[in-house]
Image: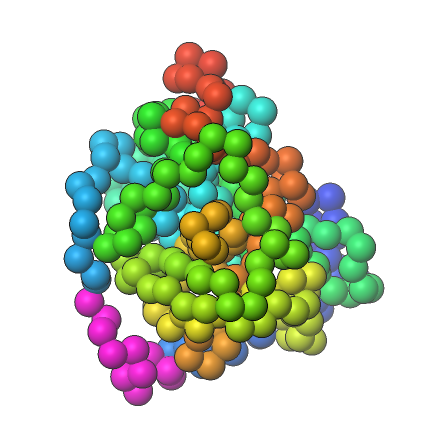
Amino acid sequence: MSAFTVGERRIPRVVTRTIIVGLLGLIIGSVGYWAVGAIRDRRETQRTTAEFDPPVWAGQNPPGGCPGGFYARREQTIVLTISAHCATPGAALRDAAGKMIGVFGQRAVVDECPPDRLCQASDFLAMALVAERIPWGHLNVVDLGAGGYRTIESGTAPFGCGDVKLGDLAETNGREHYRTGKVVANDPYDFSTDVIFPCMIRTGIQVHSGDSGGSVLVNGIPAGVMSRTFGETSGFTPLAEGLENLGLTLCTTPDCDLSPDTAVQPAG
């Protein structure tokens, strides 16, 4: 059976077709939801803070990309987490002028997985940024638009699945629509037409177009990235498990314990 490779794992083509069909169903369902006007306010929420230069993309959208999640580092390289189903591993992201933004890495694939299925620790991959796109001095910041900047304190441990409890307050800012909602469920996610996630945390946060990959804070702590739609509300996959799977360390200091002289980034 023909297959393609995700990380070190070869996934049969029939699985890729099944996953694609499942994601298309989610997308089509979401489009229908948006079309009937269930999202009452499609305008961007008003910012409360000025943007840095270069801008912080954690919580915001890189040009041409899905919402950014969090800044992290793999050894000497600064990365930004991006939705795994919005990017192709190994591909480059460029802005409208053709200038390089970064290079996508591999997905957070879980090896312990049923035959002919694809399992992921969390729904993101890491984009290694070119040097000039790194907001030095602000790598421990998340830009929640109308929700303001949030600084991740030194030594903060990202939440994993077990750290998030029912009733906790979650917040996100996908596509510049700042929203909050309570955690309503925390369960495995296993549909025959989609990726298997060991943990999917459902919230009361209302869906907006292009949420996928956006950072989620729970009780003010980095907790995950938006991943799936459940009717009118959203679900996210946990941050800690995805970072560990990809060998990443969350940035909790302004320069992520690196510097422009010591960081090793892809060529622009």
Q: Residue at x 57, y 30 (%)?
A: 74
Q: Tell me where residue 62 sits by quadrant.
A: top left
Q: Which residues are magenta?
A: 32-43
Looking at the picture, how far across and down is residue 247, in whole percent?
Answer: 64, 35
As displayed, is residue 128 above or below residue 202? above
Name the image quarter holding the N terminus: bottom right
Q: Is residue 113 visible?
A: yes
Q: Is residue 3 above or below residue 157?
A: below
* Front in this rendered view, residue 210 or 253: 253
Residue 36 placement, left or right of 258: left
According to the image, what is the colour scheme of the structure?
Answer: rainbow
Q: Residue at x 24, y 55 (%)?
A: 146
User: What secondary structure is the magenta-colored segment mainly?
Assistant: loop
Residue at (78% x, 59% y) in the render: 113
Q: Is residue 129 above or below residue 191?
A: above
Observer-nearest of 8 and 257 = 257
| Side of 202 where 64 appears, left or right | left
Q: Horizontal and vertical percent for residue 210?
A: 37, 63
* Residue 111 included in the magenta stretch of the image: no
99 and 2: which one is in front? 99
Measuring from the top left, give residue 116's x and y in whole percent: 78, 65
Quadrant, the C terminus: top left
**Residue 109: x, y in percent?**
68, 51
Q: How many marks?
A: 0
Lateral position of residue 95 relative to residue 103, left or right: left
Residue 242 visible? no
Residue at the spot 42% in from the left edge and 79% down from the top edge: 232
Which residue is outermost to the bottom?
36
